[in-house]
Image (spheres, helix red, strand yellow):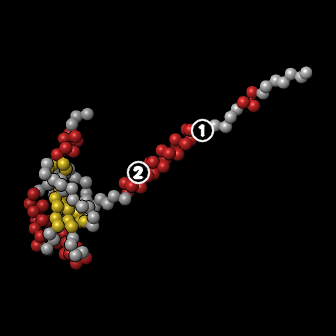
Amino acid sequence: MPVSIPSPGAKKHARIEIIPLIDIIFFLLATFVMVSLSMVKNKGIPVNLPVAASGQPQERKDFSSITLTENGDLYFNKQQVTLPELEAALKELTTQESEPRVFINGDQKAEFGKAVAALDIARRLGITKIAIETKPRAAASEASAPQ
């Protein structure tokens, strides 16, 4: 009777390699995050917003942004403007939209007089939906906490 010698290759089973699968999942996750972040409209210049405990979230649909920087520069939707140019831009905005929404965001060290002038221009042109952007107190305390 012949003796059969088992082959070491005969006992191998098909396997699903998990490492390439994990790589693909992380790639898809990173792509999703990047696409979703690029969909957020940020019309303002990044500034250090003042802190307010009484601030409430506002609807961020179809809005324009007026930004005041620490060194006194004034921006309307990320374009640097002067006060007369801001007035012309806001006047054009009122002709394009029936109820324009304006967010004023400024650095906490910005000149208060320019903020009041920008607010005054917007109100004089009949824009009533105006909000001043602030950081919530909880977010500000987390940002200043030592790590």
Residue 54 visible in image: yes
Q: Where residue 69 appears, x then y in whole percent?
A: 19, 56
Q: Where residue 47 appears, x then y in whole percent?
A: 22, 53
Residue bearing the label numbered 1? 17
Observer-nearest of 135 and 82? 135
Q: Residue at x 18, y 69 (%)?
A: 86
Circle number at residue 85: none
Q: Please name the amino acid that badge 2 sits on.
A: Val
Q: Where residue 120 appears, x then y in whole percent?
A: 10, 68
Label 2, secondary structure: give it.
helix
Label 1, secondary structure: give it.
loop
**Is 90 on the left-hand or right-hand side of 120?**
right
Q: Residues within 10 Å of mark 2 (few under 14, many from 20)?
A: few
Q: Total label count?
A: 2
Observer-nearest of 3 and 87? 3
Residue bearing the label numbered 2? 33
Q: Residue at x 26, y 61 (%)?
A: 60
Q: Residue at x 52, y 46 (%)?
A: 24
Residue furthest to the right in view is 1
Using the numbered discs, state the Cα–Cα distance from disc 2 to disc 1 in whole angstroms: 25 Å
Q: Quadrant of the N terminus?
A: top right
Q: Quadrant of residue 3?
A: top right
Q: Earlier in the sequence, mark 2 or mark 1?
A: 1
**Is 18 on the left-hand or right-hand side of 107?**
right
Q: Please name the amino acid that badge 1 sits on.
A: Glu
Q: Residues within 10 Å of mark 1 (few under 14, many from 20)?
A: few
Residue 79 visible in image: no
